[in-house]
Amino acid sequence: MTNRVTIVGSLNVDTTMRIKRMPLPGETISALDKTNAAGGKGANQAVAAARSGAATAFVGQVGDDANGKMMIKSLNEDKVDTTGINVDGKAGTGSAAILLDDDGQNSILVYGGANQELSVKEVEAAKEQIANADFVIAQFETPQDATLRAFQIAKENGVKTILNPAPAHEINPELLKLTDLIIPNETESASLTGIIITDETSMLMSAAKFAQMGVRNLIITVGAKGAFYCTQDGYNFVPAFKVKAVDTTAAGDTFIGALSSQLKPDMSNIEKALSYAQRASSLAVQKLGAMPSIPTHDEVIAASKN
């Protein structure tokens, strides 16, 4: 059965500059290469879900400009339903400037633009896309008020909610109570719980803390090491696949989108879905760019057989 996934989130045009190393404060260095591509955490997650076979819809906002048209066209090419994307006449389309060094590490500056103007009104207009999903996914590159309303609509219609609290900042407690699965990385988890991730004990303590906040299912991604999950049925740490990273820009987004395409709404197959998502993410980091690096379902399955 095909999962139906609706993303409430950000749409950015990414400008990536390749450099040998990160500049020091006050230092000017030359870029080796410059590229523009569709991106944004929300858009990346939507494309990852769609390429892994999910029937994917998007709720978000772009500016009335060339970048906005490019973002909608890009999502349509991946068969993402864009009828829930509003065109805002005031703010420009979101953008990101990415510095990428020779080790595959990145630093990112984000301009929110139209993403930050997404409101409850636009979410209400996309009620159908939210109510008809198996999973609704949100991040923090759009306002929490909009996410809260999306999650309320989801819960009213028996839809499971996934929160990717990135970039990390203070969360409305009501939003956490409406979250079925939270997926932070180790830094974001520590920021939200105050518990530094060092070992399995600290991960279980974090799971208990999130449960106190109202979220009973947790996945903590720990970069190249792997991912820890804890649900009401059990917990485990699933190691990552060892690969040479070229560009880590969309690794986390690929993981979340791919996971949502395979995960059963009752989360009974979480370890299998998590392993699939890790394989997808391991393929993404071996290519340059955010969206261009996201693999298809066939590519993930082929890599699993090697």
Image: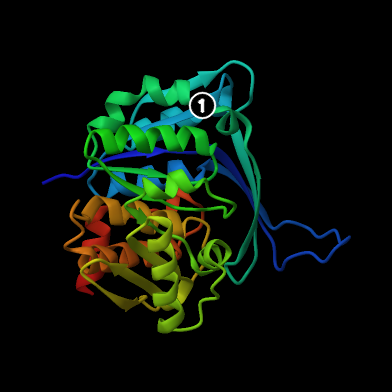
x and y percentages locating residue 252 in the rendered image: 45, 59
The answer to whether any part of residue 80 appears in the image is no
Left or right of 157 on screen, residue 223: right
- Seen in the picture, residue 2 relative to 303 is either above or below; the reply is above
Query: The C terminus lies in which quarter of the figure?
Result: bottom left
Q: Amino acid at mark 1?
A: Ser
Residue at 44 percent across and 67 percent down: it is 209
Residue at 63 percent across and 31 percent down: it is 113
In terms of depth relative to the viewer, which is nearer, 235 or 214?
A: 214
The answer to whether any part of residue 289 appears in the image is yes
Query: Among all residues in the image, which is located at the extreme front?
Result: 212
Q: Quadrant of residue 100?
A: bottom right
Q: Quadrant of residue 273?
A: bottom left
x and y percentages locating residue 13 in the rendered image: 57, 38
Q: Secondary structure at mark 1?
A: loop
Residue at 29 percent across and 57 percent down: it is 259
Left or right of 118 on screen, residue 28: right
Circle 1 Cα neighbour tier, 10 Å, few/some/many (<14 / 14–19 / ≥20): some
Residue at 44 percent across and 28 percent down: it is 72
x and y percentages locating residue 202 in the rendered image: 46, 79
Query: Among all residues in the image, which is located at the extreme right?
Result: 26
In terms of depth relative to the viewer, which is nearer, 201 or 249?
A: 201
The residue labelled by disc 1 is: 119
x and y percentages locating residue 183 in the rendered image: 41, 59
- Seen in the picture, residue 267 relative to 243 is either above or below; the reply is above
Query: Among all residues in the image, which is located at the extreme left?
Result: 1
In terms of depth relative to the viewer, which is nearer, 34 or 11?
A: 11
